[in-house]
Amino acid sequence: MPKAFRFSVKVPKTITHEARLIGTATLLDGFVTEMSALGPRLGCLLVQLPPSLTFDADIAGAFFDALRDRYAGKTVLEPRHSTWFTPGAEQLLVARQIARVAADPAISPEAREPGGWPGVVYYRLHGSPRVYYSAYDKAYLDRLAVKLRAHARSGTATYCIFDNTALGKATLNALDVRAAVTS
């Protein structure tokens, strides 16, 4: 594994999907203990929410405060309900230094670009038009590489994760983007 490689770790579904961010202190304690074993190889935490989880400022605030009490490192949120793309949600994320994922496919125009706290940029690409199966074409990957290079040059921690893994397209897309970013 390359020396500069960093892991992105997804918060367990027991916290995000089953508990729906409520009453998760004990679950967070266990998770943070486990993932801390990665030490300096840990790059970023991903909090991916279920599509049915609507934004509630009290619930989200309490959850991210509890998370921040346990972990101060880079953290991103992938919300999958349109209620998370509001000024109130953005303010909450910025205040707690939580970046919002740029996702494809996007549930709204705002979901296509990074948001929340600007200290981290994280693209999570699931394949399009067929989620998990489709490869991205060269034109899309070239445009993405320009964005990634610009973020990285500005000093922002920048991540790009391909989740179009069903037919092995993620590896090819990642290698193409890597080549374009480093050229």
Image: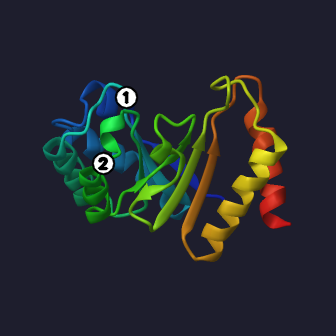
> Toward the viewer: 3 or 74?
74
**Residue 10 appears at what percent x and percent y?**
46, 41
Q: Is residue 135 left or right of residue 74?
A: right
Can I make out residue 1 in this image? Answer: no
Judge by depth and name the residue closer to the eye, 159 or 55: 55
Separation of residues labelled 2 and 1 (CA atoms): 18 Å
Which numbered tag is attached to residue 50?
A: 1
Residue at the spot x=46%, y=47% of the render?
Answer: 110
Under mark 2, the amino acid is: Thr
User: In terms of secondary structure, where does tag 1 sit?
Assistant: loop
Question: Could you tell me the amino acid type at mark 1?
Answer: Pro
Residue highlighted by disc 2:
86
Point 41% across, 34% down: residue: 80
Q: Which badge, 2 or 1, comes first in the chain's sequence?
A: 1
Q: Quadrant of the N terminus?
A: bottom right
- The mark closer to the camera, 2 or 1, is 2
Q: Position of residue 43 (x, y in %)?
A: 52, 59
Where is the C terminus found, in terms of image quarters?
A: bottom right
Residue 36 is at least partly visible in this image: yes
